[in-house]
Image: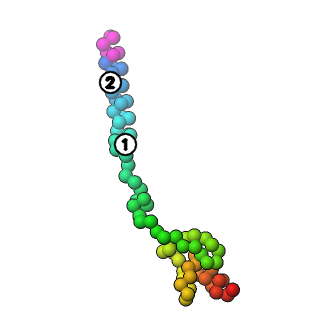
Amino acid sequence: MKFLLWAGLIAAVIWVLRSKKKSSPAAPSPAPSSAKREIEVMLRCADCGTHFPASEAVFDASNTAYCSSEHRQRHAVH
């Protein structure tokens, strides 16, 4: 009877250890895809002063950067 109890206990411990090993990652996960993107230049809006990525810039005839077309138009009025 003692033998069956010990065998059951050992089997339970092995089962718990194996289930935890499967659920935990063996190696660190790779960096998110956003970390692989290149660093982009930030520009400052001439109207409101907000910093924004250069790819989202709206430029006027004098090559001044704005964060939106509304700010470009509003600044042109002044």
The crowd level at tag 2 (other Cα within 10 Å; few <14, some 14-19, many 20+) is few
Task: Name the residue located 57 percent from the left edge and 70 percent from the top edge.
Answer: 51
**Based on the displayed image, in which of its 4 quarters is residue 46 positioned?**
bottom right
> In the rendered view, would you say 34 is above or below 48?
above
Q: Which residues are magenta?
A: 1-6
Asked if one can make out residue 68 in the rendered structure from this viewpoint, the answer is no
Q: Which mark is residue 50?
A: none
Residue 2 falls within the magenta-colored stretch: yes
Q: Give the structural element (helix, strand or loop) at label 2.
A: helix
Q: Earlier in the sequence, mark 2 or mark 1?
A: 2
Residue 70 % position (x, y): 62, 81
Q: Nearer the viewer, residue 40 or 69?
A: 40
Residue 13 % position (x, y): 36, 25
Question: From the image, which quarter does the N terminus lie in?
Answer: top left
* Relative horizontal placement of residue 48, taking residue 30 as reference (left or right): right
Q: Which residue is mark 1?
A: 25
Compute the Cα span from label 2 to label 1: 23 Å
**Based on the displayed image, in which of its 4 quarters is residue 8 positioned?**
top left
- Which residue type does callout 1 highlight? Pro
Residue 37 % position (x, y): 41, 64
Q: Which residue is mark 2?
A: 11
